[in-house]
Image (cartoon, rainbow, N blue to C red):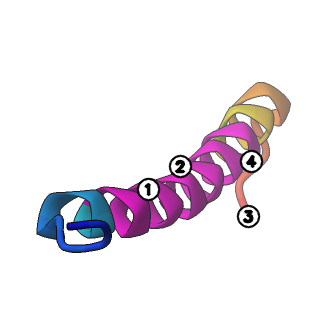
Amino acid sequence: MSGHSKWSTIKRKKAASDAKRGQIFTKLAKEIAIAAREGADP
């Protein structure tokens, strides 16, 4: 019964959305670290 596993479908979607989400968090974390290093108030 190929293609009938609900979990495999969810897993694929979740992996894609988690990767996208992870990239956003990584970008924000880098920006925060740079701002903290510079130490200037915005």
Q: Which residues are magenta?
A: 11-31
Mark 1 touches mark 4? (CB < 8 Å) = no
Q: Is residue 17 left or right of residue 4?
A: right
Mark 1 touches mark 2? (CB < 8 Å) = yes
Task: Give the CA separation, mark 3 to mark 2.
Answer: 25 Å
Quadrant of the image for the N terminus?
A: bottom left
Nearer to the camera, 37 or 4: 4
- Mark seen at residue 31: 4
- Which is more N-terminal, label 4 or label 1? 1
| Label 1 Cα neighbours within 10 Å, binned few <14 / some 14-19 / many ≥20 | few
- Mark seen at residue 22: 2
- Residue 33 screen position, x and y as percent: 69, 32
Res 5 → quadrant? bottom left
Q: Is residue 18 left or right of residue 9?
A: right
Mark in the foreground, 1 or 3: 1
Res 38 → quadrant? top right
Q: Determine which residue is flagged by label 3.
A: 42
Q: Determine which residue is flagged by label 1.
A: 18
| Label 3 Cα neighbours within 10 Å, binned few <14 / some 14-19 / many ≥20 | few
Mark in the foreground, 1 or 2: 1
Mark in the foreground, 1 or 4: 1
Residue that appears at 30% across and 69% down: 9
Task: Give the CA separation, mark 1 to mark 4.
Answer: 20 Å
What SS does tag 2 mark?
A: helix
Mark 4 touches mark 2? (CB < 8 Å) = no
Quadrant of the image for the C terminus?
A: bottom right
Task: Give the CA separation, mark 4 to mark 2.
Answer: 14 Å
Task: Give the CA separation, mark 3 to mark 4.
Answer: 13 Å
Nearer to the camera, 22 or 11: 11
